[in-house]
Amino acid sequence: MVIGLTKAASHKHCIVCGKTIEEMDSFCDEVCESKYRSAQRRQTLFFLVFIGLLVLMLIVPVFLKAPQG
């Protein structure tokens, strides 16, 4: 037995909460857009801190092992 599927109108989903939105939009409202931007800033900050710590872990031992005098 085959059940017929109906075609839905062309649409997208909010990238934060998943609600159905129009094709031209990325978010369903300002709250979801704000949450997304905040998460992006947090992720960027985490990445920069990670890179900074990585650089310190690679550079500091070189200065500690440098011959004195």
Image (cartoon, rainbow, N blue to C red):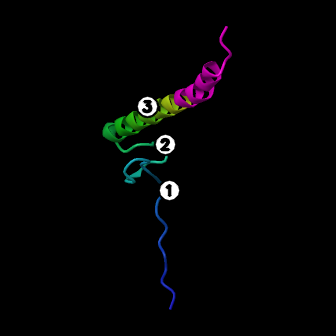
Above or below residue 56? Residue 38 is below
C-alpha span from label 2 to label 1: 11 Å
Q: Which region of the structure is painted magenta?
A: 52-69
| Up-down relation of residue 25 to residue 7 (above or below) | above
Report the residue that reaches farthest toward the front.
Answer: 69
Q: In which quarter of the image is the C terminus?
A: top right
Which residue is under mark 3? 41
* Circles 3 and 2 in contact, beta carbons < 8 Å: no
Q: Which residue lies furthest to the top in this view?
A: 69
Instruction: Name the amino acid type tagged 2.
Output: Met
The residue wearing badge 2 is 24
Amino acid type assigned to the residue bearing label 3 in the image: Arg
Determine the secondary structure under disc 3.
helix
- Residue at the (49%, 80%) spot, across then down: 4
**Lower position in the chain sequence, tag 2 or tag 1:** 1
Are the residues flagged by discs 1 and 3 in contact, CB closer than 8 Å?
Answer: no
Residue 10: give its label. 1
